[in-house]
Structures are given as structure tokens and as C-alpha cells.
Amino acid sequence: MLDETVPDGPIVLIGHSMGGMTIMAFAEQHPEYFGSRVVATVLMSTSGGRLEETKFGLPALISKAGTPLLPLVNSATRVSGGVIDRARSASSDLAWLLTRRYGFGDPKPSPALVSYVEEMNSRTSTETVARYLRTLYTHARYPALKALRSAHSLVIVGDRDMITPVNHSEEILRHLPDAEFVKVPDSGHVVMLEHADEVNAVLISFLEKLTA
């Protein structure tokens, strides 16, 4: 529980992609935390729903699953760890290329950074990926954003994000009209890695405003 991790003082929740979705799910289950314990939230490269519109972005999220999984997306309830294992073994080299294509805004990102993201994604267990796919298209958390209005909010997105495109952040802003919004130029889904200095500066400025 959050209280066990941070027993005292104000809390700022920062979530990227699925992390942002997790914050929304938490707000849906425990709206009473927002405005009292949770004083601010940062939603980065994420979505409150409508993910069915971005199927082309799935390879970057599931990494080594690659193209063999795409025909299964519309029948995600039948996806299992064994299916993903077979797909991963069939497309290990393709995973790196897909990560570069869908994770970054720069058409020629640092190969080392691409490898870092691809390796991080590949460490996700197959069963976790399977469960993620089964719930991805049922993600609908826009009503939960109402709880976030009790706290300060910052929304960050890369202007070339192909997995959770800018219009997903704009829809979040429609539910959080007082939120601060930052669109990072020439950045894809992993905006906090691709443009770390810019994102860090925005976060520091946001936190300084809270303390002021």
C-alpha cells in the first residue's frame, strides 16, 4: 500500500505509459487520496483509453513478441504466456528494430539507448505481457480523472509518440482542464529517455511551483 511506502507527508505520483494508467486505476479505486495525501500527479506518455486506435504501437510495448502477436490482438483473451514465448523466439532481431521505430521520435536514435529500452522490455515476464494484452483494450479510465482534479497535474507527451499519441494526452486534458501541458518536440514514447534534460527541467519546475 501507498501508506506503507510513504507513511508521512505529501506525495507526488509520476507515471509513464502503463505507470500513468496505474495512477488512473488507483484514483478510480481510492479517490480519497487525491488532494489530501497525493498533492500532485504527472502523467507522461499515457492514455485514459481509446488504445484500440493505436494497434500499430503494440510491438514497442511488448518488445520481443513482435509481429507474430499482431493477429492475436483482436482475440487477446486467448493470449497466453506460451504463445508469447513462441512469438518472441521467432522475432528476437525484429524486436530491436521495432523498439527503435515505435519508441523514439528521432529516426536515428542512439543504438545504445534503443538496446537499453529493448532489453528492459524483454525482461518483462511472458505471463505479465499476456495479462497486459488481455486488459489493454478494456482500459477506460477517463471518469477516474475526476479524482485527479483535487491535486495539481502535469501532462507530458512527445509530439511524435506513436504508441500513445498526442491526441490521447489532449483527451486527458479535456478531463483535467487545469493541468499543465508540455509537448516535447521531436520525441517519441520514451520521452524521458530521449529528451531527459528537457523532461527533468519540466519536472523540477513543476515541483518547485508546488513547494512555493
Image: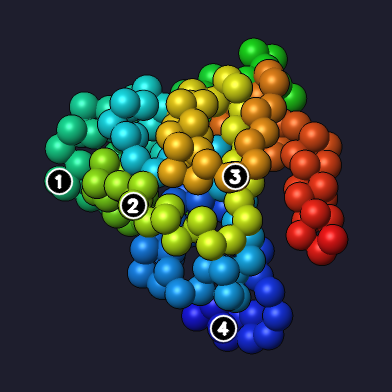
Image coordinates of residue 102 in percent, x first then y, are 51, 24
Give above or below for 136 relative to 34.
above
Residue at 68% from the left image edge and 74% from the top image edge: 10
Dot 2 or dot 1: first in sequence order is 1
Instruction: Check disc 3 and give the amino acid type.
Output: Ala
| Pair 3/1: label in front | 3
> Tag 1, which secondary structure?
helix
Count residues near mark 2 (Cα–Cα under 10 Å), then give few for <14, some for 14-19, many for 20+. Answer: few
Residue at left 80%, top 54%? 209
Residue type marked 2: Pro
Q: Which residue is mark 3?
A: 179
Q: Residues under labels 2 and 3: Cα distance?
A: 16 Å
Q: In the image, which is nearer the foreground, mark 2 or mark 1?
A: 2
Q: Marks 2 and 1, how far apart in space?
A: 28 Å
Asked whether the beta carbons under mark 3 and mark 1 sit within 8 Å of each other, the answer is: no
Estimate the x, y position of residue 195 in percent, counting from the top left.
Answer: 75, 32
Q: Is residue 192 above or below residue 96?
A: below
Spatial CA span between label 4 and label 3: 25 Å
Q: Which residue is mark 2?
A: 143
Q: Helix, strand or loop at disc 3?
A: loop
Q: Which residue is mark 1?
A: 78
Left or right, residue 182 beside residue 163 = right
Foreground of the two, 155 or 56:
155
* Foreground tag (4 vs 1): 4
Real-space CA distance between mark 4 and mark 1, rounded to the nearest whole angstrom: 36 Å
Nearer the viewer's eye, disc 4 or disc 3?
Answer: 3
